[in-house]
């Protein structure tokens, strides 16, 4: 058989959280690598993703980790939060605690999406049955015997079976056989009777009470479900400790402490307690200290001797669990109410005897001599030390698996089972709870998702050699090689050309490129850039995470460098990192047109904010020879020249580019600025109107060109024309997203403050058409400026304050420019005009840092003029108007100047 055509088979046993995360990573990794794979998912459950933990439909059962920590992907922490926003919870935050059932739906949906996207590369078979045995075949593969009598063969097997069943060893033998004893509370139907029995009128009989054995997170969930008036829920454990709650507000992060490499348990204990003390002194809270240990827990556990591990479990195990595995604040509040009402009572001790009573309830004797009557005794003690179902038993019996350290879980090396001789025998792997002895902390999603990603990479790594040798790589429009196949490269070239021309369809073309080749790093990075900069309908964090994964697996140095540039840009890194990375990239790869476009502030991108136009011009001129006379560098240079006030040169460059490519949007945009800044308003209006109706018909930013025409009409003091154009070309419905803020909203404000708009100003309609997150949590300072203008036009002080709060924690430009802008505009809304004028005037020299063009930033100057007139500072207003009229002829400014009192 042709080795390149063989399909590797992986069987994943278990379709709960661990199995689903593994299946997702296998599907996506195989698809990125173009590795054919057969994936068998074996589990009797009706739906993948839920397992025991996420099948509960009780809305009181919430996750024990905030939504921001529950993503399926270790490199995309916001994925679950964004999923919730798209599925009926638009206001959810990463600090909120979602219900368990919703999380199960998220896991199932993420797997379904991964399967759909892997179609053609990965074939997934879902077998709703149990695996009962695993053994090697003569040809070195693995055979799974299923409960329905079938056998299946696989090259490797992943046991994602979750926590081991509890052993009930604590329960007296007679109690274990009682019909009032519930040993597996999450089994389907296990709680039907205790939940269904009515409490009856008033105080019910003690036989309605419930005893939960264990006070961990399972007991917490059951206490909420079983709580009702007239019933007492008792909870019993050796320590009597309930899980601690998460903080109501996010706690600050702390660096990990010194002394974690202490050679002994006692030294490590001292270092940790000192660290907790520092956290309490600095923050009044121990949680930051404990959370900072999370990345180091597995390493610290491995560093301890078996005797030290056992001592830790005896001395600190319960304390660690109750502080490390916490419950949500909402859950804690509900428990507090139940305890205050004495419907929940927590006891310390153990059961020594259980005697049946005539009414069917149990009379329970505790180790301290107290007695309780309970109609139901429910085991909430958590998982047993190691898995003991038939499948695992077959592996233990044959020596293919051995118990882990201290009898916890199984012995593994990087997730692969070690046999009785300490070697990696069968190609059987596991993750999550069975690795508890090896890693200690391995049962939470943040740990399991990392293991799933590592396991997928490990399972598929040997298959790379089976792929056919790479052919000669296709090239982009400017001769740069692309790490993809010809079809995806063609789609990428289409997207790139549309970006350079500022034409519609670039997003669709790049999306087609990654659909044709999900492992194409540049395609994902281009989508992330368009979503971040241009408001394209792209899940930016997801696209960026995909770009990084693909760049690690299949990309050359240029492509990896570009992905790094986009990553730094999306994350708002400052001049010492983001700008240096972009400039270094262009120095090494001057023909990378998308990087050059992103570096220069134009209609498409905000550019590098901390570069002046002289440096940006030099950058374009240095890069131009790599384009061999192509019109694109000339169109960029035209825009920069007009920003420098060199209008004749800008017009010549724009004309040259338009002669070569009449649809060149950057050149048309530069010419629009030349006409506006030089005061050629009639000619500019007519020329641009004709271009938009002709060669510019397919421009992606037609609304922005309409905004330019309206600016001419505003300067010509033609309010009727401004109003007609706004409703015809700039009203919500015709323009949405960021462009609605930048173009539609800003034009309304400029018309209003120059007394060129009569009646209601429909700025609220503009804000309603823009996602609240864009308005109040904008990704760039440029968007933030226009959001502040729109909120000011709407008189939304609360929105301005929320925007200011966001900007104070964002990138340096937002902190240093947008924050004082919000403060000055808030003063304007509150009619503190002198204060507003001072604040706006102080911002003019640094306003260029937000990016965009002088014509766009001019809205702040015009707002200053409005504040000066309102404050009665007519002389300052006159000087400002004189300066504006010196720049260019504008009948509107002449009208405003004439209206000033002498």
Image: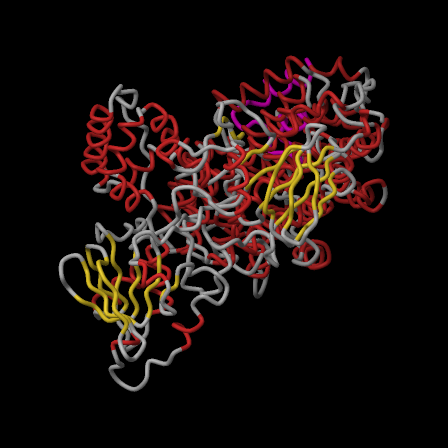
Snapshot quadrant of residue 294: top left
Snapshot quadrant of residue 391: top right
The mark tally for this picture is 0
Write the residue at 22% across / 70% down.
Answer: 341
Q: Is residue 311 magenta?
A: no
Q: Is residue 614 magenta?
A: yes
- Visible residue check, residue 243: yes
Image x and y of residue 406, in percent: 35, 33
Identify whether 196 is placed above or below 268: below
Snapshot quadrant of residue 708: top right
Image x and y of residue 888, in percent: 63, 36
Residue at the left extreme, as displayed: 369
Write the residue at 51% across / 42% down.
Answer: 393
Identify whether 369 is placed above or below 863: below
Looking at the picture, tell me which residue is in the foreground, 435 or 859: 435
Image x and y of residue 536, in percent: 66, 44
Identify whether 556 is placed above or below 893: above
Relative placement, left or right, of 178 versus 390 is: left
- Visible residue check, residue 827: no
Write the residue at 63% across / 40% down.
Answer: 531
Image x and y of residue 493, in percent: 80, 30
Relative placement, left or right, of 230 versus 420 is: left
Write the residue at 64% across / 29% down.
Answer: 598
Give the magenta-colored segment's residue range.
595-622
Looking at the picture, tell me which residue is in the foreground, 592 or 669: 592
Tell me the colour scheme of the image. secondary structure
Relative placement, left or right, of 168 versus 517 is: left
Where is the N terminus found, in terms of image quarters? top right
Relative placement, left or right, of 898 versus 176 is: right
Looking at the picture, tell me which residue is in the foreground, 608 or 336: 336
């Amino acid at each position: 058989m042709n080795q390149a055509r063989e399909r590797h088979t992986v069987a994943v046993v278990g379709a709960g959280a661990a199995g689903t995360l593994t299946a997702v990573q296998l599907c996506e990794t195989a698809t990125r690598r173009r590795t054919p794979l057969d994936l068998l998912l074996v589990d009797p459950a009706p739906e993948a993703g839920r397992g025991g933990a996420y099948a509960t439909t009780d809305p009181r059962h919430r996750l024990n980790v905030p939504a921001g920590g529950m993503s399926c992907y270790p490199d995309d922490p916001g994925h679950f939060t964004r999923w919730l926003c798209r599925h009926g919870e638009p206001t959810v935050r990463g600090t909120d605690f979602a219900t368990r059932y919703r999380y199960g739906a998220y896991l199932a949906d993420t797997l379904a999406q991964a399967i759909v996207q892997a179609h053609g590369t990965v074939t997934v078979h879902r077998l709703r049955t149990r695996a009962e045995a695993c053994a090697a075949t003569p040809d070195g593969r693995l055979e799974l015997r299923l409960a329905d009598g079938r056998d299946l063969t696989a090259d490797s097997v992943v046991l994602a079976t979750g926590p081991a069943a509890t052993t009930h060893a604590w329960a007296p033998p007679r109690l274990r056989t009682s019909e009032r004893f519930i040993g597996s509370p999450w089994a389907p139907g296990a709680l039907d009777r205790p939940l269904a029995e009515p409490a009856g009128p008033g105080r019910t009989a003690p036989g309605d009470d419930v005893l939960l054995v264990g006070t961990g997170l399972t007991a917490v969930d059951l206490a909420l479900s079983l709580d009702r008036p007239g019933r007492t829920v008792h909870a019993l454990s050796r320590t009597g400790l309930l899980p601690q709650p998460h903080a109501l507000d996010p706690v600050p992060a702390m660096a990990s402490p010194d002394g974690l490499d202490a050679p002994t348990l006692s030294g490590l204990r001292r270092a940790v307690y000192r660290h907790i003390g520092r956290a309490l002194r600095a923050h009044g809270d121990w949680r930051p200290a404990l959370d900072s240990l999370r990345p180091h827990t597995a390493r610290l556990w491995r560093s301890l001797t078996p005797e030290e591990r056992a001592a830790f479990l005896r001395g600190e195990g319960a304390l660690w669990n109750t502080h490390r595995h916490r419950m949500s604040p909402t859950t804690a509040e509900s428990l507090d109410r139940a305890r205050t009402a004495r419907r929940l009572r927590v006891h310390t001790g153990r059961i020594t005897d259980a005697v049946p009573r005539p009414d069917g309830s149990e009379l329970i004797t505790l180790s301290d001599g107290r007695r309780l009557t309970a109609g139901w005794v429910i085991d909430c003690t958590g998982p047993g030390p190691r898995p003991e179902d038939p499948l695992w038993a077959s592996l233990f019996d044959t020596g293919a698996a051995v118990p882990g350290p201290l009898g916890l879980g199984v012995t593994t090396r990087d997730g692969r089972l070690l046999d009785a001789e300490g070697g990696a025998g069968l190609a059987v792997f596991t993750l999550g709870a069975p690795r508890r002895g090896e890693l200690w902390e391995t049962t939470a999603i943040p740990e399991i998702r990392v293991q799933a990603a590592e396991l997928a990479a490990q399972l598929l790594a040997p298959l790379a050699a089976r792929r056919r040798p790479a052919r000669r790589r296709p090239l982009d429009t400017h001769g740069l090689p692309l790490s993809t196949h010809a079809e995806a490269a063609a789609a990428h070239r289409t997207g790139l050309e549309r970006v350079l021309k500022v034409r519609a369809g670039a997003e669709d073309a790049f999306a087609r490129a990654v659909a044709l080749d999900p492992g194409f790093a540049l395609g994902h990075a281009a989508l992330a850039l368009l979503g971040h900069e241009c408001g394209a309908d792209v899940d930016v964090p997801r696209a960026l995470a995909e770009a990084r994964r693909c760049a690690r697996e299949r990309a050359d140095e240029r492509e990896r460098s570009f992905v790094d540039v986009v990553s730094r840009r999306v994350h708002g890194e400052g001049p010492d990192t983001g700008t240096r990375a972009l400039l270094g990239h262009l120095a090494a790869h001057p023909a990378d047109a998308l990087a050059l476009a992103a570096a220069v502030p134009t209609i498409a991108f905000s550019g590098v904010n901390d570069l002046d136009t002289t440096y940006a011009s030099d950058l374009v001129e240095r890069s131009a020879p790599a384009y061999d006379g192509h019109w694109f560098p000339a169109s960029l240079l035209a825009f920069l020249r007009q920003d420098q006030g060199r209008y004749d040169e800008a017009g010549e460059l724009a004309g040259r580019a338009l002669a070569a490519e009449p649809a060149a949007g950057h050149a048309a945009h530069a010419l629009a600025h030349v006409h506006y800044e030089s005061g050629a308003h009639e000619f500019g209006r007519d020329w641009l109107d004709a271009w938009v109706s002709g060669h510019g018909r397919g421009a992606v930013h037609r609304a922005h060109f309409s905004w330019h025409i309206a600016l001419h009409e505003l300067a010509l003091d033609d309010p009727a024309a401004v109003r007609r154009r706004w409703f015809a070309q700039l009203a919500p419905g015709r323009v949405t997203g960021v462009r609605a803020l930048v173009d539609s909203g800003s034009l309304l404000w400029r018309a209003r403050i120059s007394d060129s708009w009569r009646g209601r100003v429909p700025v609220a309609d503009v804000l309603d058409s823009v996602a609240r997150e864009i308005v109040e949590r904008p990704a760039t300072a440029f968007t933030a400026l226009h959001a502040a203008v729109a909120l000011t036009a709407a008189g939304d002080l609360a929105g301005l304050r929320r925007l200011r709060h966001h900007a104070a924690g964002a990138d340096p430009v937002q902190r240093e420019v947008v924050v004082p802008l919000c403060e000055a505009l808030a003063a304007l809304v509150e009619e503190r005009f002198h204060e507003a004028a001072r604040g706006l005037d102080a911002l003019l020299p640094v306003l260029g840092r937000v990016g965009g063009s002088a014509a766009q930033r001019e809205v702040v100057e015009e707002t200053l003029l409005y504040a000066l007139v309102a404050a009665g500072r007519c002389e300052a207003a006159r000087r400002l108007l004189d300066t504006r009229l010196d720049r260019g002829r504008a009948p509107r400014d002449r009208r405003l100047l004439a209206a000033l009192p002498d």
